[in-house]
């Protein structure tokens, strides 16, 4: 049956493809904010019957941080360093999309193969988790602007979060909150580092970081 | 029963002609007459023997006394062999006719005895390969085929480049043969004899079968030009005279396909992963081949890369067939094998046609560079329209033959994709993805090749527009006619292929249900209907258009040039610029080298600017060269043994002999 | 009865096709605050061109005027593969959608070589772009149809299109939606609409389809005009049957609904054309690769 849930997950998958195919930093940030929003809605929608207060806390916390706080931080960082788009990524956009399709196929296969103690709320949930991990890694590997890399980390975190809510009965809340906290701290540090890299090197090309080696 | 006699006499005919040509090398006229006559008679006899087998429906054997150890002169013509024999002899017949005129042009420059001798030997050896029933005999035929085609590749081998090409070919084909040698020895060790029949009844272990299959894929794949092993092909095929290029590209590489099919039929029920491997390799060959073809500037090299592509399509079909066998679905297997076999024939026809066309172009203009040609359709209409038909056929467009075979593979893959379990259905969709990609790319490639060479304004003055002799024109017209005939009426030929395809089925396989055959044939009648309606519609619309235009003013002007006053032919879009944007997209898989020298002044003189691009073969550059360099370095220690002193060599031989003798006699004790 | 309704539908779709072009133009005019050309303008244009003489370039050969003729033959057959209302076409057979895709390819091949026939570098440029974009479009198209074939379990176009129902949308709407959005991009690309190509531009360097036909005139050009309308009808009606699987159990009414719904697609295209500009040439492939990605995604989801 096509539940709204399935549609939401497919939308989530599509945002990942859009992330792989877009070059503007602004649209990357917008997409990752959309992901945060979708995840928040999925959190509530994935609960059969009335959702507990715990779920609402999770969902709202998620939307507040990933959909509002982080994008705002990112926008500020982008504005401060005044760059608009990813220039000459290591892996082109079309090739990234191809890699995305292949990794989606791989994730479907992995999702079928891995045994889990409890069933996730949807057949698509676990493959999507893997897919988001791959996409995050792909973004980190193939792009060369520091901000895109942070976006990549965030996509991976979103994947882990989706994994958490897929097995929400099995995973305690504080684990999830802990991860969220980690990421918040991480994003703050990244913000500071981006600022410093820009001051130091006048570029956000992470290739320049290679100069730091002995 | 006349079948075996025809076969024997046909082979003898080729051999006699080869022998006479060998001695008559100084006399061009004699060599041409004898070489061509021997080849034509041999081909006709071979065709008679194959058709007699197919019309009777029973296979026949020919067993001659033989004194070679381990070998036996054991030939057998079953449906599969007969099909390949018809392909070999039928096409060789046409290529011989063409070759007579084509080679005769060279009579003042080169001796013609050698090429004709090698040509006859090549046709004879291919016949041996597809009919032999003994491993050693097969290898002898295989080796003879490699050597005779090597001499033909070296036809213009007096330049450095020509020699390099020949030697690359020689090394590649022998590396392939090495794997086949291992394969046949393993087969013989396990079954006790080099006879195929012994192996057929023998039940080999799984691991042995795996080894045999991998050896076959590498060995036969090298000859067929399957992608990672193809590097020799785009070099060697263009170097030979055009009718030999046609023979090598259209026919000789198919012996590799024959080998793979024969192994599948001998091996019993294939496991599913064979199909996956074949589909993977087929996909890489098909897409890679067409991409490299798109990047070429040399017409014959472009065609050669398209052979890699078409071998890929054939292997995709075989992979589908193996999937069908492995998952217990005979109708699927039948569709896959039928598609593959039909494409074997079709590719022989249209690739032969295109190579003959390329030869005619080369003969008239003296160049094969796409960007130096143009506007040839007005000067060479027959070649042009035949080439157009070949181009449409190779792009897989209806209503021509290339479409029918691709359609069969498509339909099979769609059925497989719907019916089969995971992950085999994924592989079926990979076939579909591959076929669509190459459909579009081949269209782009051949609209480029035809458009640039035959249309527009001539880019260079055509040196001599001498007319095409009929012996060169008619083979092309016949081949073009076959392209249309098979494209519009595929049912008879597919019905004729049914026994050949079921020959590939291993004996353990249950019979193919009759309904599967009729449903496939039914589908093809729809293709016939569609094609006929299409042709009729085009005819009627054409008449209608003429009716409208009948009594109106039709004027001629220059091409609209946006008001630019002095257009020159050099301003036309070239082949390189046509393909550039597509190649840009596939840049990660296809690194092309561009050399651009730019002038820095505002009004550059013509001498200071130049642009050239060329796309080297990936595999050659980044795999084979490093590998061979590594081997070279490691084995340079052996150089010590090579002093050039004859006496020392004899000493080595004697020492080796004595050592072997002692070892053997010691083992006897 | 079936053959009668087929014949009527076939003839009326051939007749009505140019109307959709003028619906697009009307929509664009509405949003631009203009009145726009009359509804029958495409017919008037075609008739006018049919009654003109022709001018051919000295460079060209027969390829130039043969190409629209072959193109029309291909598209007429493709039209015959479409179902009538909710009943399959009488020409339907397994794999007819492959034939349809390859008939499009045949037509394209001839238009490309016709463009090269003129020897003009502008037309060569258009031909090159056409070959490039069409390759990607074809992948999206066939993979999309493959996803549908997998979903419906049938191999003929009529079967697929008539089996899609509201029930199927409820069950696996995700797959159908992905395929439909991919097909919509295919429609825009194949019919040379914004954002892939701009049918109105008069700057040769930016055009694709328009630049390839600069040297066609008179009846040849009339055919080309008609062809682009027919192509819109074919792909549009495939798309409509996917998106709106409603039926009132009457072949005539169902077919009438399809005619009306394709008009809806024409309005949508007009909306897109009035609201956005043409994409930069080097981002067009990205859009088309995106469409192929959507189709591949639908296929992968359908494989489970």
Image (tube, rainbow, N blue to C red):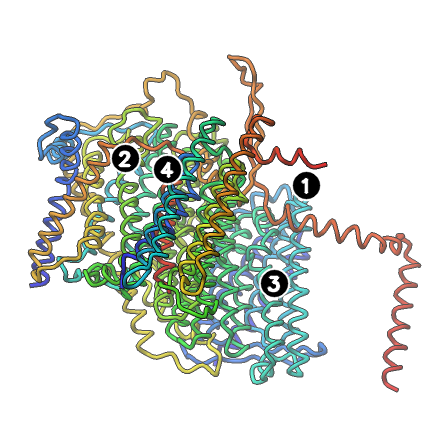
Label 1: few (<14), some (14–19) or many (≥20) C-alpha neighbours in 10 Å: few
Res. C146 image quadrant: bottom left
> CA gap, disc 1 to disc 4?
46 Å
Residue B543 drawn at (x, y percent): 18, 43
Element class at badge 3 = helix
Disc 1: which chain?
B
> CA gap, disc 1 to disc 2?
54 Å
Label 3: few (<14), some (14–19) or many (≥20) C-alpha neighbours in 10 Å: many
Query: Which of the two marks, 2 or 3, is nearer to us in this view?
Result: 2
Report the disc number at residue B159.
1
Q: Which residue is mark 2?
A: C194
- Residue B457 against residue C170 in the figure, above or below: above
Q: Do circles 3 and 1 both sit on a common chain? A: yes
Q: Nearer the viewer, residue B295 or B148?
A: B295
Relative horizontal placement of residue C26, taking residue C156 as reference (left or right): left
Q: Nearer the viewer, residue A25 or B610?
A: A25
> CA gap, disc 2 to disc 3?
49 Å
Q: Which residue is mark 4?
A: C284
Residue C164 drawn at (x, y percent): 21, 60
Report the disc number at residue B602.
none
């Amino acid at each position: 049956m096509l539940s709204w849930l399935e549609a939401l997950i497919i939308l989530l998958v599509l945002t990942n493809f859009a992330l792989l195919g877009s070059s503007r930093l602004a649209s990357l940030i917008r997409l990752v904010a959309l992901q945060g929003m979708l995840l928040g809605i999925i959190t509530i929608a994935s609960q059969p019957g009335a959702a507990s207060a715990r779920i609402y806390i999770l969902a709202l916390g998620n939307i507040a941080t990933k959909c509002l706080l982080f994008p705002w931080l990112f926008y500020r960082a982008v504005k401060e360093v005044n760059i608009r788009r990813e220039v000459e990524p290591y892996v082109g956009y079309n090739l990234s999309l191809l890699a995305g399709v292949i990794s989606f196929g791989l994730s479907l296969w992995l999702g079928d193969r891995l045994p889990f103690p409890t069933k996730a709320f949807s057949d698509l949930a676990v493959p999507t988790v893997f897919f988001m991990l791959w996409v995050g890694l792909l973004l980190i590997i193939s792009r060369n602007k520091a901000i895109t890399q942070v976006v990549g980390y965030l996509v991976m975190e979103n994947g882990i979060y989706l994994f958490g809510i897929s097995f929400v009965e099995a995973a305690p809340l504080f684990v999830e909150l802990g991860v969220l906290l980690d990421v918040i701290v991480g994003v703050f540090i990244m913000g500071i580092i981006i600022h410093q890299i820009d001051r130091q090197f006048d570029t956000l090309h992470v290739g320049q970081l290679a100069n730091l080696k002995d | 029963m006349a079948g075996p006699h025809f076969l024997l006499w046909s082979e003898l005919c080729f051999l006699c002609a080869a022998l006479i040509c060998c001695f008559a090398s100084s006399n061009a006229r004699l060599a041409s007459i004898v070489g061509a006559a021997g080849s034509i008679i041999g081909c006709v006899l071979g065709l008679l023997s194959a058709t007699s087998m197919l019309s009777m429906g029973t296979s026949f054997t020919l067993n001659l006394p033989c004194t070679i150890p381990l070998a036996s002169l054991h030939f057998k013509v079953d449906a599969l062999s007969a099909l390949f024999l018809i392909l070999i002899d039928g096409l060789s017949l046409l290529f011989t006719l063409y070759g007579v005129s084509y080679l005769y042009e060279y009579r003042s420059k080169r001796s013609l005895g050698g090429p004709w001798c090698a040509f006859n030997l090549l046709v004879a050896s291919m016949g041996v390969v597809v009919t032999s029933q003994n491993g050693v005999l097969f290898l002898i035929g295989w080796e003879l085929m490699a050597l005779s085609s090597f001499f033909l590749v070296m036809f213009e081998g007096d330049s450095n480049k020509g020699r390099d090409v020949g030697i690359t070919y020689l090394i590649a084909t022998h590396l392939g043969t090495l794997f086949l040698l291992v394969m046949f020895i393993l087969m013989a060790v396990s079954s006790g004899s080099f006879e195929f029949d012994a192996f057929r009844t023998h039940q080999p272990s799984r691991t042995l079968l795996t080894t045999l299959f991998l050896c076959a894929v590498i060995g036969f794949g090298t000859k067929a030009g399957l992608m990672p092993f193809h590097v020799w092909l785009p070099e060697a095929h263009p170097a030979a005279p055009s009718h030999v290029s046609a023979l090598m590209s259209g026919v000789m590489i198919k012996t590799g396909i024959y080998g793979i099919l024969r192994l599948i039929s001998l091996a019993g029920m294939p496991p599913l992963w064979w199909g996956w491997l074949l589909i993977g390799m087929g996909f890489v060959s098909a897409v890679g081949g067409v991409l490299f073809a798109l990047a070429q500037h040399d017409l014959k090299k472009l065609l050669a890369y398209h052979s890699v592509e078409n071998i890929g399509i054939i292997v995709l079909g075989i992979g589908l067939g193996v999937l069908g066998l492995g998952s217990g679905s005979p109708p699927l297997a039948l569709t896959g094998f039928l598609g593959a076999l039909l494409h074997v024939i079709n590719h022989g026809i249209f690739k032969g046609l295109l190579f003959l066309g390329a030869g005619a172009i080369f003969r008239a203009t003296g160049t094969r560079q796409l960007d130096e040609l143009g506007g040839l359709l007005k000067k060479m209409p027959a070649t042009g329209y035949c080439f157009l038909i070949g181009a449409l056929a190779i792009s897989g467009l209806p209503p021509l033959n290339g479409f029918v075979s691709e359609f069969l593979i498509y339909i099979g893959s769609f059925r497989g994709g719907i019916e089969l379990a995971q992950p085999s259905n994924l592989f079926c969709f990979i076939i579909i993805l591959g076929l669509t990609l190459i459909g579009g790319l081949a269209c782009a490639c051949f609209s480029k090749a035809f458009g640039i060479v035959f249309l527009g304004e001539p880019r260079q003055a055509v040196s001599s527009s001498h007319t095409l002799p009929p012996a060169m024109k008619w083979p092309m017209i016949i081949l073009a006619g076959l392209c249309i005939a098979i494209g519009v009426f595929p049912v008879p030929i597919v019905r004729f292929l049914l026994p050949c395809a079921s020959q590939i089925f291993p004996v353990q396989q249950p019979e193919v249900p009759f309904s599967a055959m009729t449903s496939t044939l039914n589908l093809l009648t729809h293709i016939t209907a569609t094609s006929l309606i299409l042709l009729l519609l085009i005819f009627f619309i054409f008449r209608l258009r003429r009716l409208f235009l009948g009594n109106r003013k039709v004027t001629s002007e220059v091409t609209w040039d946006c008001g630019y006053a002095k257009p020159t032919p050099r301003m036309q879009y070239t082949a390189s610029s046509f393909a550039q944007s597509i190649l840009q997209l596939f840049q990660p898989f296809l690194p092309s080298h561009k050399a651009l020298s730019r002038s820095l002044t505002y009004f550059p003189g013509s001498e200071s600017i130049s642009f050239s691009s060329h796309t080297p073969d990936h595999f050659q550059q980044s795999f084979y060269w490093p590998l061979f360099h590594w081997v070279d370095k490691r084995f340079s220690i052996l150089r010590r043994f090579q002093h050039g002193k004859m006496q020392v060599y004899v000493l080595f031989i004697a020492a080796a002999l004595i050592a072997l003798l002692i070892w053997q006699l010691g083992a006897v004790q | 009865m079936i053959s009668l309704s087929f014949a009527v539908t076939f003839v009326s779709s051939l007749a009505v096709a140019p109307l959709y072009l003028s619906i697009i133009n009307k929509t664009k005019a509405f949003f631009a605050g203009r009145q726009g050309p009359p509804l029958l303008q495409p017919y008037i244009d075609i008739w006018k061109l049919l009654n003109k003489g022709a001018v051919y370039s000295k460079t060209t050969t027969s390829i130039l005027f043969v190409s629209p003729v072959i193109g029309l033959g291909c598209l007429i057959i493709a039209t015959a593969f479409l179902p009538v209302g909710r009943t399959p076409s009488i020409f339907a057979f397994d794999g007819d959608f492959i034939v349809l895709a390859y008939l499009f390819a045949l037509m394209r091949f001839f238009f490309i070589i016709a463009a090269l026939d003129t020897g003009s570098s502008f037309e060569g440029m258009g031909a090159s772009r056409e070959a490039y974009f069409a390759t990607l479009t074809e992948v999206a198209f066939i993979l999309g149809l493959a996803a549908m074939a997998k979903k419906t379990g049938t191999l003929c176009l009529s079967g697929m299109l008539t089996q899609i129902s509201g029930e199927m949308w409820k069950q696996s709407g995700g797959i159908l939606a992905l395929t439909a959005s991919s097909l919509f991009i295919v429609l825009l690309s194949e019919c040379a609409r914004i954002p892939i190509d701009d049918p109105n531009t008069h700057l040769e360097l930016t055009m694709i389809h328009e630049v390839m036909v600069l040297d066609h005139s008179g009846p040849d050009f009339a055919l080309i005009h008609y062809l682009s309308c027919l192509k819109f009808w074919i792909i549009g009606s495939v798309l409509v049957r996917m998106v709106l699987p409603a039926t009132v159990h009457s072949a005539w009414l169902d077919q009438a609904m399809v005619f009306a719904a394709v008009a809806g697609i024409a309005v949508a295209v007009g909306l897109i054309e009035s609201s956005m500009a043409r994409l930069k040439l080097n981002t067009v492939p990205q859009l088309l690769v995106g469409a192929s990605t959507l189709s591949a995604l639908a296929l992968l989801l359908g494989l489970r």
